[in-house]
Amino acid sequence: MSNATELQMPPHSCVAEGAPQEGRNIFDALADGLDALLEPVLNKAFLVSFIAAGIMAIPIFCDVLARFIFSDSLEGIIETEEYFMVLIVFLALGWVQKKGGGHIKIDLITCKMPQRFVRLLDTFHNVVSTAFFGLVFWRTCVTAMLKMGEHSIMLKIPLSIFITVAAAGLLLLVFTLLSQTLRGISDNLKDKAVIGLLVAVALAVAFLAFPFWYKMLPDQLSRLGLGMVGMTTMISLLLLGMPIGFAMAVVGFLGLSAIGFNMTPALNTLGVGPYSTTASFILAVAPLFICMGLLCSESGISKDLFDSADKWMGHLPGGLVMAALSGCAGFAAVCGDSMATAVTMGSVALPEMQRKKYNASLACGALAAGGTLGILIPPSMGFIFYALVTEESVGKLFVAGIVPGVVLTLMYILSVYVIAKARPEWAPRGERASLSVRLLSLKGIVWMILLFVLILGGILVGVFSPTEGAAVGVVGAFGILVLRGRVTRKVMKDVLTQTANITTKLLMILIGVGILGYFLAASRLPDEMAALITGHGYNRYVVLVGILGLYAILGCLMNVIPMILLTLPTIFPTVKALGFDPIWFGVITVIMMEMGQITPPVGVNVFAMSSVAPDVPMGAIFKGILPFMFCMVLMLALLIFFPGMATWLVGMLF
C-alpha cells in the first residue's frame, strides 16, 4: 500500500533548500536536548495510539455479534470507543508533528517563496502555536481537575483519567513545537536574519495579544465585522503555511476572546472543546473506514478487480482503460479514499497498459480520474466528513452517492470508448476471452462484493449504524487479508501507522473547526451571510454557481477533506436557507471535491499517478484528464437539472 493519502500535500516541483548547517549555537543545543527527551516518549505515546487504532473495531464487532446472536448488547461500547478516539488522536499529536509529515497545511505559496523568508514564517507559526497549545494544555488540566470525582455513566471510569491523557498528549505537542521553534530561531540566526527574527517574534506576540489591545481601541468592529476580519486572517494564515487545524483554532479562540466581555468563555472552550470533539463515538467511523480501506489495499483486491474487468472488456476499443476504470469503481466500494484508489489501481493496471502500447496521457489521465470515484461511491470519506460537519445522515449520503457514482463511471467508460474509436492507435484492442474464462474471473471479486453488500446493506437495513458497519468492514477486510495469506508484521505496522497518522491529522482539523465554530456562531457571520443572500432575492441557482466556482478555485489550491471542513461551516447555512436539499448538495460537494483531485496546480491524484509513472510528463497527465473533467461538469449539470438522481434512491430506502 502506498503511503499516499487524501491528506498529504503533493510533492511540488520546487524543492526547498535545506536549513543552513554551518555552526551551532545554544538554540541547537537546547533543541537537541529537548529532542533527546522527547524521542522515546513520543514513540511510546504513538505506540499506544497505534494499538488503539488496531483494536478499536473489536468491541464494536463483538457488540454487533452479541446483538445478532443473543439479542443483547454489550455495555459501555460507546464509552469505550470514545476513549479509543482520545488515545488515538491526542497521543499521536506530537508524533505527527515531528515524524508523521506534520499536520496538514497549504504550501502552494510558501513553496515558491525564498527559504529564508519561509523560515521566518515558520518561526512566527511555531511561536503562535506553541503558546496557543500551551494554553490549551493548561485549560485541559483545569478541566481534568474540575472533573475529579465524576465517572462515566456505563463503565464508571473517572472522567479525569482520559482528560488527563488528552492533556499529556497536548503537552507532548507543545514540547515538539517548542523544539521546532528553537531550531527555527537557530536557522534564522544562521541566516543572519536577526531583524527578521525579532519582527516575526514581535508579530507573534502582538497577534496572540489581539483580544487585549483590540478592546483598548476607541472604535471597535461589529460582531459581523469581527467575524469577517477573523475569516480573512485565517485565510491569510493558511496561505502563509500555518497548519489548517492550528490556524482555525487560534483564530477561533482569539476572535471569541475579542467578542466576549472577558476571556472566560473562550478559555473554557479551550478546556472542553478539543476533548469533547475527539471523544465521539460517531467520529470513530473515520479511523475504522480508513483502516478498512488500507487493509483492502493490502489484500490484492485491486488486482482481482482489474483482471476480471480485463477479461470482460479488454477486447473492446480502449478495453484496458475501461477495465481499469471499472476496477477503480469496484475498489472505491471498499476503500473510500481517492488517492489510494488511484495509486493502487495505477500500480496494477499501468504496467499492462504500457506493455500493450497504450497512450500514456490517456492511461494516466483515466487512472487519476478513476481514483476520484473513491470519494463518491460509498463508503466515502468525503461523505463521512460532510456528514460530521452538517450533521446529516451518513447512510443517506452513502445511498445518494450510488447512482451518480455508477453514472459517472459509465460516462468515463463511454468517453474512453469514443476516444479509442477516434484514435485506435492510442488504445489497441486485446484478445477476446472465452465465456468460461470470464465467468471464472468473477471468483476474484466475490470477496469485494460480499464486503460491500455486508457494509452498505447492513447500514441500509438498519442492522448496524455507519460506525458499526465500519467496524464490521475492518474485521471483514482483515479476514480477507488472512485468507489470502498476506498478513505480515510489516503490513499491519504500515496499516495501523497510517490509520493513526491520517486520523490524527483529520481530527486536528475537526478540533480547529469546533473552536472556530464557536467564534462564527458568536459573530453570526454564517447566518448573516445567508440572510444577506436570501434577502436580496438572488436566484438560488446563481448563488449555487457561485459556490461551485468557489469550490473549483479552492480545489485547485488545497486537498479535498480540509476544503470541506474549512468551508462548510460558513456555506452550509446559506445552502439550507436557499432551500436546497442538504443530501443532494452533499453529492454536489463531493463531485466538486473529485474535480479538485485532478485540477492543477494541486491535483493530488495527478501527482500520485506521476509517482507511479515517473517517465510520463506531468503535463501529459493533466492533458489526459480533460475528457474526464468534462464528464464531471456534465454530471454536475445532470444533478442540477435532475436532482432525483441523488435523492430518488434515498427516498425509496429511508
Image (tube, rainbow, N blue to C red):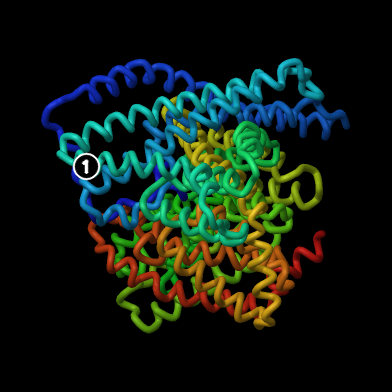
Can the viewer see residue 434? Answer: no
Callout 1 crowding tier (Cα within 10 Å): few <14, some 14–19, many ≥20? few
Of the pair 370 and 357, the residue shown nearer to us: 370
How many numbered discs?
Answer: 1
Left or right of residue 15, residue 607 in this image: right
Of the pair 248 and 158, the residue shown nearer to us: 248
Instruction: Note whether 249 is above or below 528 in the view shown.
Output: above
Give coordinates of residue 100: x percent, y percent.
Answer: 40, 35
Q: Residue at x 46, y 55 (%)?
A: 233
Instruction: Note whether 523 is above or below 87 in the view shown.
Output: below
Quadrant assignment for the C terminus: bottom right
Instruction: Note whether 517 is above or below 643 in the view shown.
Output: above
Give coordinates of residue 470: x percent, y percent.
Answer: 66, 41
* Residue sitting farthest toward the right: 71
Q: Residue at x 48, y 50 (%)?
A: 302
Task: Check disc 1 and report the residue beneath it.
Answer: 195
Of the pair 103 and 181, the residue shown nearer to us: 181
Of the pair 510 and 125, the residue shown nearer to us: 125
Left or right of residue 457, residue 636 in this image: left
Give coordinates of residue 149: x percent, y percent.
Answer: 75, 15
Q: Which residue is drawn at 46% across and 63% down?
A: 555
* Residue sitting farthest toward the front: 218
Instruction: Note whether 181 is above or below 532 in the view shown.
Output: above
Q: Which residue is drawn at 88% across and 32% down?
A: 71
Amino acid carrying label 1: it is Ile
Quadrant assignment for the N terminus: top left
Secondary element under disc 1, as helix, strand or loop, is: helix
Can the viewer see residue 598? Answer: yes
Give coordinates of residue 304: x percent, y percent.
Answer: 49, 50
